[in-house]
Image (cartoon, helix red, strand yellow):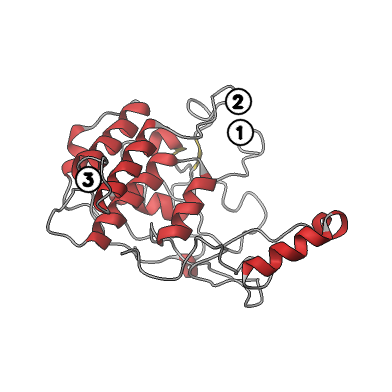
Amino acid sequence: MTASYGDNYANASITSYMTGYNDPRLPVYFTPNTDPGHTTEYTGIRIGSNIPPKPFYSGFALYNTTSTFTISAPEMLMTAAEVWFLKAEAALRGWSGAGDARTDYETGINTSLLQNGVPTPGYVSDATSKPAAFVDYLQSANSSPALSTVTIQWDPAASNEVLLEKIITQKWLAMFPEGQEAWTEFRRTGYPRLFPLVTNNSGGTIDTKIQIRRIPYPQSEATLNPDAEKAGIQLLGGPDNGGTRLWWDVNKGNF
């Protein structure tokens, strides 16, 4: 899909964060734009964009299948960095045995940088860099200012909500390309702040901003397992579509 067909490109949200943060993992995760019209070196495609046939977006940033996501590379399901971010959130919430939230957070970042071969001691102390605006020079209607102003450096004077945004944003960057867990964190916490859909074709069943919340049951369940499917839909507390929240996906604040 990626190496042979060139069909998997970077997403605009992750390039917004990583470009703004001058993230050293950018060339590890992606290959640079090849089209000279871009305003940044790495440009993703915004979700929900109207995508004309190739080669319209072919000059945008691709996954790095040359040296990182090779056909023989192991698939990462849970890394040491993710564990440190789990501890950081637990410590922020006051759970016993979780350690110090700042130490856990900074260790998570540095562990991810080391894992990707780009140890950068100054990254965790950057208190000024923020996510960058997204510019789609081919379809300007897709362009957007950055939705988050969260910086990297830990700030003990910040609210728990801001500190959680820091933790989850950096956790989300560190987990790439493990999309299932990244999606779960976005639904659970609302972070990182992602660009909303450009075009919503759900007919109103899925919110443009908070996006899809679950995968509907496949038709095979209705055919082969109808009783269990009916019971499952009743437990959902809502219709069997992508806009219904799961039981842990609660529409309330994080604290």
Q: Position of residue 19 (x, y in %)?
A: 33, 48
As shown in the figure, which amino acid type bears the numbered disc 3?
Answer: Ala
Q: Is residue 25 left or right of residue 124?
A: right
Tell me the quarter of the image containing the N terminus: top right
Placement of 227 over or under 97, stated as above or below: below
Please state which of the two labelled residues, at mark 1 or mark 3, is closer to the viewer: 3
Residue matched to label 3: 101
Decide: few, some or many residues near mark 1? Use Cα within 10 Å; few <14, some 14-19, many ≥20: some
Q: Are marks 1 and 2 in contact (CB under 8 Å)?
A: yes
Residue matched to label 2: 71
Spatial CA span between label 1 and label 3: 39 Å
Mark 2 / mark 3, whichever is N-terminal: 2
Q: Is residue 34 left or right of residue 116?
A: right
Residue matched to label 1: 3
Tell me the quarter of the image containing the C terminus: bottom left
**Which element is circle 3 on?**
helix
Placement of 190 over or under 105, stated as above or below: below
Spatial CA span between label 1 and label 2: 9 Å
Q: Position of residue 219 (x, y in %)?
A: 81, 59
Placement of 150 over or under 65, stated as above or below: below
